[in-house]
Image (cartoon, rainbow, N blue to C red):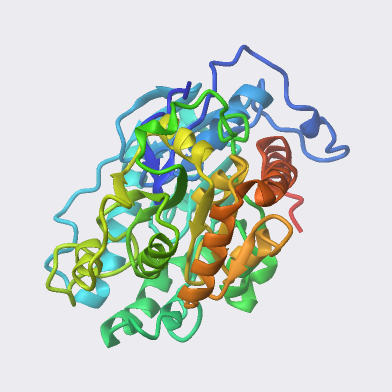
Amino acid sequence: MPGPFSGGTGPGGRPAEAEAVLPASSPVSSASKGLTGRRCFPTVPGVHVLFVHRNFPAQFGYLAGELVRRNGWRCTFVSETEPGEAAGIEKIQYRPSGDGGEHGYLLTRVIEEDVRHAVAVYERLKPLRDSLRPDLIVGHSGLGPTLFLPDLFPATPLISYFEDFYQPRRSAMAFRTDWPFSEKDRLGARVVNATVLLDLEYCTAGYTPTRFQHGLLPTAYAGKVRVLHDGIDTNFWRRREDMPPRSAFSSPRIVTYVSRGLETLRGFDIFMKIAKQVYETYPDVVFLVVGGEEAAYGEMKRLPETSFKEHVLNQDHYDLEKIQFLGILAPEVLVQILSMSDLHIYLTAPFALSWSLLDAMSCGCVVLASDTAPVSEVITSGHNGILRDFFDVEGFADVAVGVLRDPQSYRELGRAAVRTVREGFGMDVALPRMASFYEEVAAGVFR
């Protein structure tokens, strides 16, 4: 069963599925010992990493728990969430002051918000400066909290995690021409990048999960940022055989769709069109939709409805016995749903790769996905999944019907997907890479 992070979610709706346990005292990891001739870390029994994010566990919680458990490192996590301890991680809470910038000028609110968080973290950690003494600081770029930490800990290297660099005429902003961004959205993208640019300038080093995301960063800073994925807990995200009977659903075939928010960027409207074509051609199917109704990355102000889901449902007649909306699910429930899936559909504009895609692949799902970056970095069509053009509703539907009519013929795609995740993204692979990178930066030998 899930561990102490259960029930929480991070950016992108990441279920906090970690099964970290409280570690016994252990020596510095063997990877650390391999830094022959390099500066030794002063902390015993291991490196002390200070993680900074607005949320917990976010991108770093599970990674921090594994560094504590496997490597014997000390990990402290500063966020807005309640203080305490989880999986051996010391949690420190900060509270930004002010009203959230609601009364500021629209295009500068994001900067005001980032600075509020930066000041709040600085003031919260200032009295703890001498007791914390981290060997390394790791924080999410573009959200503000790490902005003033080089002034508080001037001798401590800072690693920034870069998730996105908004491009008004590239990537997600220009992709959905049927849902164009407003002029204010395009202008605002340049403002959103301001904090990211400060982080690029002042961090010691950075990392980003995919080559596509790395390619969005300004070329002047590309050498400071590596491509490293934060990893998937393949011990948790695996296909379960002890599933409840399928009689709980009205149809023998199950198609899954998972997204933090049901919105344009993740192609929810396209998915609904695909689903309708599929169930009209192949009625013995039920679509299980997991996700919240609040848009995570898009504005709703241009629509009269209260959610994009409501807007999409108003555009056509959909059989809601065939399409069931499950909302946000706890990880232990989601892994069961994915384990029953005959086909998993994933769509995204060129943007950050969803953890849910890798979770589904790790569970052995046969994945039918959009042929967009960075999906194409992970899936080779015909090898470990199937790719189709994002806007090709008919092409998606035809493939989906073929899979549903003979799912066993496609099972090897699911097995190959499991191998892809285990060999490229599993924590047994990702954690040593990340720990080595952290050690390299902390030791002052990052190149």
Residue that appears at 37% across and 34% down: 330
Q: Position of residue 408 (x, y in %)?
A: 65, 46
Horizontal arrangement in the rendering, residue 44 relative to residue 283 (left or right): right
Q: Position of residue 128 (x, y in %)?
A: 40, 32
Left or right side of 430 for 185: left
For the question of whether residue 321 can be seen, the reply is yes
Viewer-proximal residue among 228 and 131: 228
**Seen from this angle, which residue lies furthest right?**
36
392 over 251 or under it: above or below: below
Instruction: Indicate the position of residue 122 as horizontal and vertical percent values.
Output: 36, 46
For image coordinates 34% across by 84% down, the residue present is 180
Image quadrant containing the C terminus: bottom right
Horizontal side, residue 293 vs residue 89: left or right: left
Q: Between residue 29 and residue 235, name the one nearer to us.
A: 235
Residue 419 location (% of width, % of height): 73, 44
Rendered residue at 59%/34% (across/down): 239
Among the 4 quarters of the image, the one containing residue 428? top right
| Vertical side of 431 occupied by 424: above or below | below
Query: Which of the pair 120/273 is nearer the observer?
Result: 273
